[in-house]
Image (cartoon, rainbow, N blue to C red):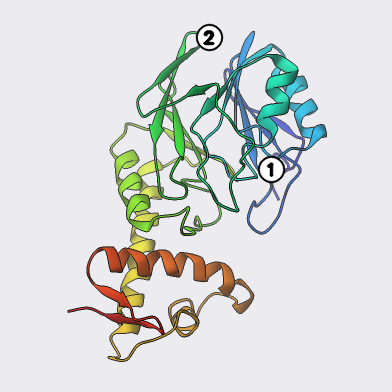
Amino acid sequence: MNAELRPGIVTQLAPGVRRLIAPNPGMMTGSGTNTYLLGESEVAVIDPGPFIEAHIEAIREAAQGAVRWILVTHTHRDHSPAAQALAEATGAPRYGQTPPTGPRQDPGFAPDIVMNDGDTLDVGGVAIRAVHTPGHAPNHLCYLHEQLGWLFTGDHVMNGSTVVIDPPDGSMNDYLASLRRIRALELDKLAPGHGDLLDDPRAEIDWIIEHRLDRQARLVAALSSGHEKTEEELVAEVYDEVDQNRHPIAMRSLLAHLIKLEEDGKARDTGSGWILEG
């Protein structure tokens, strides 16, 4: 592993931009959740991460200046739970969107200021703009550093892995639309919620869209047999190159693809399996 992609390491990525990785590595989080610190004398924190006291203290030490803003991309439990403790310790307001209901959500996150699409913060003379990107979660925001052209993507785009789209939080139709939306932005780099910087945003986004559409095409081919198939049968066929230990996770994105086909009028759940429509 890159030495800079280890929990607790502060990495200077650009003038006024630092990364600190939370100590929560794992299959779903990679090296850990990336916490970004923007600014010098006054600092904005993007995604303070899970509630781990040592990480919260590390954020305050790494900030160097005063923490004035706490920004959350979305309210899954590896991104937002530390926001409340950090706000209490620093007096900084929390920015983001209210969590929906669901077992993966952090119900304790309550934004002091709701960020809607296009809302902008002035962070030490730098404009940080919210871009609403539903798909991985309905309340997902990316944050655009307009001076650098960097997009802090949370879990909308990750490095080293595709993003799990897990209904009901996740929507494949929304996800693909959001990917196409950020592709139209003038971007220099993607700064993901897990993993290292991505230097070619459009190529990365194109690859993800192509990968998702290829997976959808494989799903349609699997359903073309003419008889209904269960999700268990489909995941074994459509994700045959994926380790079987990961099939329970893959089944969540498979369901998101099936729901997309259903929304598009191309598939139907019979109650005992799925079939193509038309």
Q: Residue 112, image x and y in percent?
A: 55, 21
The foreground one among 224 and 157 is 224
User: Which kind of residue does numbered mark 2 sit on?
Assistant: Gly
The foreground one among 58 and 110 is 110
Q: Residue 142, image x and y in percent?
A: 45, 35
Point 36% across, 29% down: residue: 117
Secondary structure of residue under mark 1:
loop
Mark nearer the viewer, 1 or 2? 2
The foreground one among 49 and 1 is 49
| Circle 2 residues within 10 Å: few <14, some 14–19, many ≥20 | some
Residue tagged by mark 1?
Answer: 5
Above or below, 241 against 112 in this view is below
Above or below, 250 against 111 in this view is below
For the residues labelled 1 and 2, the Cα–Cα distance comes to 27 Å
Residue tagged by mark 2?
Answer: 124
247 horizontally vs 23: left or right:
left
Quarter that holds the C terminus: bottom left
Point 41% across, 85% down: residue: 272
Q: Return the disc, 1 or 2, that comes first in the chain's sequence.
A: 1
Q: Residue 38, image x and y in percent?
A: 58, 20
Q: Residue 129, image x and y in percent?
A: 41, 23
161 horizontally vs 85: left or right:
left
